[in-house]
Amino acid sequence: MLSAAVIAPPALAAVWLGGYWLLALVLPVAFLMGLEWGRLVGYGGHPWLMRALAIAAPQPVLALLIGGWPIAALHLLLLAGALYALAGALDRDASKQSGLWYAAGLPAIGLPMLCLVWLRAQEPAGAETVLWLVALVIATDIGAYFCGRLIGGPKLMPSVSPKKTWAGLIGGMAAAACVGALAATLVSPGAGGTPVLAVALLSALLAVVAQTGDLAESAVKRHFDVKDSGTLIPGHGGLFDRLDGFLITLPALALLVALTGISVLQWQ
Protein backbone atom coordinates (compact mmCIF):
# COMPACT_ATOMS: atom_id res chain seq x y z
CA MET A 1 0.00 0.00 0.00
CA LEU A 2 2.87 2.39 0.79
CA SER A 3 4.36 1.87 -2.68
CA ALA A 4 1.03 2.66 -4.33
CA ALA A 5 0.60 5.76 -2.16
CA VAL A 6 4.01 7.05 -3.27
CA ILE A 7 3.57 6.26 -6.99
CA ALA A 8 -0.06 7.28 -7.54
CA PRO A 9 0.04 11.06 -6.83
CA PRO A 10 2.78 11.98 -9.35
CA ALA A 11 1.24 9.66 -11.96
CA LEU A 12 -2.21 11.22 -11.55
CA ALA A 13 -0.68 14.71 -11.59
CA ALA A 14 1.08 13.91 -14.88
CA VAL A 15 -2.22 12.80 -16.42
CA TRP A 16 -3.96 15.95 -15.23
CA LEU A 17 -1.23 18.31 -16.45
CA GLY A 18 -0.72 16.53 -19.78
CA GLY A 19 1.85 17.66 -22.32
CA TYR A 20 5.47 17.06 -21.41
CA TRP A 21 4.44 15.96 -17.93
CA LEU A 22 2.48 13.08 -19.40
CA LEU A 23 5.38 12.15 -21.67
CA ALA A 24 7.67 12.16 -18.64
CA LEU A 25 5.41 9.47 -17.21
CA VAL A 26 4.60 7.43 -20.34
CA LEU A 27 8.05 7.10 -21.91
CA PRO A 28 9.88 5.68 -18.83
CA VAL A 29 6.93 3.42 -18.02
CA ALA A 30 6.98 2.00 -21.57
CA PHE A 31 10.75 1.48 -21.31
CA LEU A 32 10.47 -0.38 -17.99
CA MET A 33 7.56 -2.46 -19.24
CA GLY A 34 9.71 -3.47 -22.21
CA LEU A 35 12.31 -4.84 -19.79
CA GLU A 36 9.60 -6.63 -17.81
CA TRP A 37 8.09 -8.24 -20.89
CA GLY A 38 11.48 -9.50 -22.03
CA ARG A 39 12.05 -11.23 -18.69
CA LEU A 40 8.47 -12.48 -18.52
CA VAL A 41 8.66 -14.33 -21.85
CA GLY A 42 12.03 -15.90 -21.12
CA TYR A 43 14.60 -13.49 -22.57
CA GLY A 44 16.13 -12.38 -19.28
CA GLY A 45 19.40 -14.04 -20.26
CA HIS A 46 19.66 -12.05 -23.51
CA PRO A 47 20.70 -8.50 -22.56
CA TRP A 48 20.71 -7.18 -26.14
CA LEU A 49 17.16 -8.38 -26.75
CA MET A 50 16.02 -6.93 -23.44
CA ARG A 51 17.51 -3.55 -24.32
CA ALA A 52 16.12 -3.62 -27.86
CA LEU A 53 12.55 -4.15 -26.65
CA ALA A 54 12.89 -1.57 -23.88
CA ILE A 55 14.21 1.05 -26.33
CA ALA A 56 11.54 0.21 -28.93
CA ALA A 57 8.58 0.33 -26.51
CA PRO A 58 8.37 4.15 -26.14
CA GLN A 59 8.99 4.87 -29.82
CA PRO A 60 5.39 4.57 -31.13
CA VAL A 61 4.40 7.40 -28.78
CA LEU A 62 7.12 9.62 -30.22
CA ALA A 63 5.98 8.66 -33.72
CA LEU A 64 2.42 9.68 -32.80
CA LEU A 65 3.60 13.11 -31.74
CA ILE A 66 5.59 13.56 -34.94
CA GLY A 67 3.25 12.17 -37.59
CA GLY A 68 -0.08 11.21 -36.06
CA TRP A 69 -1.78 7.82 -35.96
CA PRO A 70 -0.82 6.55 -39.47
CA ILE A 71 2.89 7.04 -38.77
CA ALA A 72 2.58 5.63 -35.25
CA ALA A 73 0.74 2.50 -36.44
CA LEU A 74 3.25 1.90 -39.24
CA HIS A 75 6.13 2.49 -36.84
CA LEU A 76 4.68 -0.01 -34.37
CA LEU A 77 4.21 -2.72 -37.01
CA LEU A 78 7.68 -2.24 -38.51
CA LEU A 79 9.33 -2.28 -35.10
CA ALA A 80 7.46 -5.43 -34.08
CA GLY A 81 8.65 -7.15 -37.26
CA ALA A 82 12.20 -5.98 -36.64
CA LEU A 83 12.13 -7.30 -33.08
CA TYR A 84 10.88 -10.68 -34.29
CA ALA A 85 13.70 -10.86 -36.83
CA LEU A 86 16.22 -9.75 -34.20
CA ALA A 87 15.07 -12.48 -31.81
CA GLY A 88 15.52 -15.07 -34.54
CA ALA A 89 18.99 -13.78 -35.36
CA LEU A 90 20.33 -13.56 -31.80
CA ASP A 91 18.59 -16.58 -30.28
CA ARG A 92 18.89 -19.36 -32.84
CA ASP A 93 18.00 -22.04 -30.28
CA ALA A 94 14.56 -20.54 -29.64
CA SER A 95 11.42 -21.56 -31.48
CA LYS A 96 9.50 -19.23 -33.78
CA GLN A 97 6.79 -19.14 -31.14
CA SER A 98 9.12 -17.66 -28.53
CA GLY A 99 10.16 -14.99 -31.01
CA LEU A 100 6.49 -14.12 -31.55
CA TRP A 101 5.95 -13.84 -27.80
CA TYR A 102 8.94 -11.50 -27.60
CA ALA A 103 7.80 -9.28 -30.50
CA ALA A 104 4.22 -9.23 -29.16
CA GLY A 105 5.50 -7.16 -26.26
CA LEU A 106 5.71 -4.10 -28.48
CA PRO A 107 1.99 -3.84 -29.38
CA ALA A 108 1.05 -5.02 -25.87
CA ILE A 109 2.88 -1.98 -24.48
CA GLY A 110 2.89 0.50 -27.34
CA LEU A 111 -0.80 0.45 -28.26
CA PRO A 112 -2.12 1.27 -24.75
CA MET A 113 0.48 4.03 -24.39
CA LEU A 114 -0.59 5.51 -27.73
CA CYS A 115 -4.23 5.40 -26.66
CA LEU A 116 -3.43 7.04 -23.32
CA VAL A 117 -1.68 9.98 -24.98
CA TRP A 118 -4.41 10.30 -27.62
CA LEU A 119 -7.28 10.18 -25.11
CA ARG A 120 -5.61 12.76 -22.89
CA ALA A 121 -5.36 15.11 -25.89
CA GLN A 122 -9.09 14.94 -26.64
CA GLU A 123 -11.12 18.03 -25.86
CA PRO A 124 -13.03 19.18 -23.94
CA ALA A 125 -12.51 16.61 -21.17
CA GLY A 126 -9.43 14.52 -22.00
CA ALA A 127 -7.89 14.69 -18.54
CA GLU A 128 -11.20 13.95 -16.83
CA THR A 129 -11.86 11.00 -19.14
CA VAL A 130 -8.49 9.39 -18.42
CA LEU A 131 -8.83 9.94 -14.68
CA TRP A 132 -12.33 8.44 -14.81
CA LEU A 133 -10.86 5.37 -16.52
CA VAL A 134 -8.16 5.12 -13.86
CA ALA A 135 -10.77 5.37 -11.11
CA LEU A 136 -13.08 2.78 -12.63
CA VAL A 137 -10.27 0.23 -13.13
CA ILE A 138 -9.14 0.70 -9.52
CA ALA A 139 -12.76 0.42 -8.35
CA THR A 140 -13.16 -2.75 -10.40
CA ASP A 141 -10.18 -4.34 -8.66
CA ILE A 142 -11.39 -3.30 -5.21
CA GLY A 143 -15.00 -4.35 -5.82
CA ALA A 144 -13.93 -7.68 -7.30
CA TYR A 145 -11.57 -8.38 -4.41
CA PHE A 146 -14.03 -7.71 -1.60
CA CYS A 147 -17.05 -9.32 -3.26
CA GLY A 148 -14.98 -12.33 -4.18
CA ARG A 149 -13.74 -12.70 -0.62
CA LEU A 150 -17.08 -12.05 1.08
CA ILE A 151 -19.39 -13.94 -1.28
CA GLY A 152 -17.18 -16.52 -2.95
CA GLY A 153 -19.07 -18.94 -5.15
CA PRO A 154 -18.30 -20.31 -8.62
CA LYS A 155 -14.90 -19.53 -10.10
CA LEU A 156 -14.62 -17.33 -13.15
CA MET A 157 -11.70 -19.08 -14.90
CA PRO A 158 -10.07 -21.46 -12.41
CA SER A 159 -7.53 -22.77 -14.93
CA VAL A 160 -6.16 -19.25 -15.40
CA SER A 161 -6.80 -17.45 -12.10
CA PRO A 162 -8.05 -19.75 -9.31
CA LYS A 163 -9.11 -16.92 -6.98
CA LYS A 164 -11.38 -14.96 -9.31
CA THR A 165 -15.12 -15.56 -8.98
CA TRP A 166 -18.29 -14.55 -10.78
CA ALA A 167 -19.33 -12.70 -7.65
CA GLY A 168 -16.10 -10.74 -7.83
CA LEU A 169 -16.76 -9.83 -11.46
CA ILE A 170 -20.26 -8.57 -10.63
CA GLY A 171 -18.94 -6.66 -7.62
CA GLY A 172 -16.29 -5.04 -9.79
CA MET A 173 -18.91 -4.04 -12.35
CA ALA A 174 -21.09 -2.50 -9.64
CA ALA A 175 -18.16 -0.54 -8.18
CA ALA A 176 -17.16 0.73 -11.62
CA ALA A 177 -20.75 1.77 -12.36
CA CYS A 178 -20.82 3.83 -9.16
CA VAL A 179 -17.58 5.54 -10.16
CA GLY A 180 -18.99 6.27 -13.61
CA ALA A 181 -22.17 7.78 -12.19
CA LEU A 182 -20.17 9.93 -9.79
CA ALA A 183 -17.78 11.09 -12.52
CA ALA A 184 -20.62 12.06 -14.87
CA THR A 185 -22.35 13.97 -12.08
CA LEU A 186 -19.23 15.86 -11.00
CA VAL A 187 -17.75 16.66 -14.41
CA SER A 188 -20.89 17.50 -16.35
CA PRO A 189 -23.78 18.32 -13.99
CA GLY A 190 -27.16 19.57 -15.06
CA ALA A 191 -29.89 18.55 -17.47
CA GLY A 192 -27.72 19.27 -20.53
CA GLY A 193 -24.73 17.31 -19.29
CA THR A 194 -23.60 13.76 -19.77
CA PRO A 195 -26.30 11.09 -19.19
CA VAL A 196 -25.33 9.58 -15.84
CA LEU A 197 -26.92 6.20 -16.54
CA ALA A 198 -25.09 5.88 -19.86
CA VAL A 199 -21.69 6.50 -18.25
CA ALA A 200 -22.52 4.12 -15.40
CA LEU A 201 -23.40 1.35 -17.88
CA LEU A 202 -20.29 2.05 -19.95
CA SER A 203 -18.20 1.90 -16.78
CA ALA A 204 -19.67 -1.50 -15.91
CA LEU A 205 -18.85 -2.79 -19.40
CA LEU A 206 -15.31 -1.46 -19.15
CA ALA A 207 -15.01 -3.26 -15.81
CA VAL A 208 -15.53 -6.53 -17.71
CA VAL A 209 -12.86 -5.45 -20.20
CA ALA A 210 -10.48 -4.64 -17.33
CA GLN A 211 -11.04 -8.07 -15.79
CA THR A 212 -10.31 -9.61 -19.20
CA GLY A 213 -6.97 -7.83 -19.21
CA ASP A 214 -6.25 -9.14 -15.74
CA LEU A 215 -7.06 -12.69 -16.85
CA ALA A 216 -4.97 -12.33 -20.00
CA GLU A 217 -1.92 -11.30 -17.99
CA SER A 218 -2.52 -14.19 -15.58
CA ALA A 219 -2.66 -16.56 -18.55
CA VAL A 220 0.68 -15.28 -19.86
CA LYS A 221 2.32 -15.64 -16.44
CA ARG A 222 0.90 -19.13 -16.06
CA HIS A 223 2.15 -20.06 -19.55
CA PHE A 224 5.69 -19.00 -18.62
CA ASP A 225 5.40 -20.26 -15.02
CA VAL A 226 6.07 -16.83 -13.52
CA LYS A 227 4.48 -15.56 -10.31
CA ASP A 228 4.91 -11.80 -10.90
CA SER A 229 5.80 -9.84 -14.01
CA GLY A 230 8.58 -8.07 -12.10
CA THR A 231 9.77 -6.72 -8.77
CA LEU A 232 9.76 -2.99 -9.47
CA ILE A 233 6.93 -2.18 -7.03
CA PRO A 234 7.58 -3.69 -3.58
CA GLY A 235 4.61 -5.74 -2.47
CA HIS A 236 2.84 -5.31 -5.81
CA GLY A 237 5.06 -7.12 -8.32
CA GLY A 238 5.80 -5.42 -11.62
CA LEU A 239 4.19 -2.79 -13.79
CA PHE A 240 2.25 -5.38 -15.79
CA ASP A 241 0.78 -6.71 -12.55
CA ARG A 242 -0.53 -3.23 -11.68
CA LEU A 243 -1.48 -2.01 -15.15
CA ASP A 244 -2.97 -5.14 -16.73
CA GLY A 245 -6.52 -3.75 -16.60
CA PHE A 246 -5.45 -0.55 -18.36
CA LEU A 247 -3.64 -2.34 -21.18
CA ILE A 248 -6.94 -3.41 -22.70
CA THR A 249 -9.37 -0.75 -21.45
CA LEU A 250 -7.32 2.09 -22.94
CA PRO A 251 -7.53 0.72 -26.53
CA ALA A 252 -11.20 -0.21 -26.01
CA LEU A 253 -12.12 3.29 -24.85
CA ALA A 254 -10.01 4.97 -27.53
CA LEU A 255 -11.75 2.90 -30.22
CA LEU A 256 -15.17 3.88 -28.83
CA VAL A 257 -14.28 7.58 -28.78
CA ALA A 258 -12.80 7.41 -32.29
CA LEU A 259 -15.86 5.66 -33.74
CA THR A 260 -18.51 7.78 -32.02
CA GLY A 261 -16.77 11.13 -31.73
CA ILE A 262 -18.18 11.46 -28.21
CA SER A 263 -16.21 12.95 -25.35
CA VAL A 264 -17.47 10.53 -22.71
CA LEU A 265 -17.78 12.99 -19.83
CA GLN A 266 -18.81 16.01 -21.91
CA TRP A 267 -21.65 15.01 -24.23
CA GLN A 268 -22.99 17.88 -26.27
Image (tube, grey):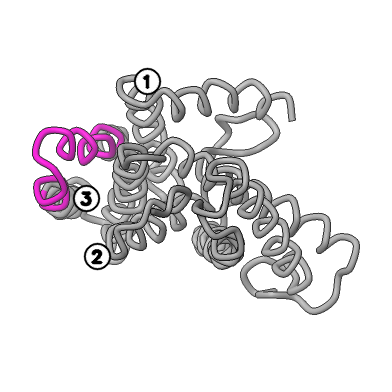
Looking at the image, residue 230 sits to the left or right of residue 152; the answer is: left
Task: Give the camera-side residue of 24 and 201.
Answer: 201
Q: Residue, x 78% and y 71% (percent of image)? A: 167
The residue sitting at the front extreme is: 191
The residue sitting at the right extreme is: 150
Circle 2 residues within 10 Å: few <14, some 14–19, many ≥20: some
Q: Percent position (x, y) of residue 66?
A: 11, 33
Q: Residue, x 77% and y 55% (percent of image)? A: 145
Amino acid type of disc 2?
Answer: Lys
Magenta-drawn segment:
54-74
Circle 3 residues within 10 Å: few <14, some 14–19, many ≥20: many
Q: Percent position (x, y) of residue 78?
A: 11, 51
Residue 210's place in the image compared with 54, above or below, is below
Camera sees residue 208: no
How far apart are labels 3 and 2 at the CA level? 9 Å
How far apart are labels 2 and 1 at the CA level? 39 Å
How far apart are labels 3 and 1 at the CA level? 33 Å
Q: Percent position (x, y) of residue 159?
A: 65, 74
Q: Is residue 25 magenta?
A: no
Q: Percent position (x, y) of residue 251?
A: 37, 56
Which image quarter: residue 39? top left
Say which element carries label 1. Answer: helix
Q: Is residue 71 magenta?
A: yes
What residue is pinned by disc 1?
A: 21
Which dot marks residue 87? 3
Which dot marks residue 96? 2
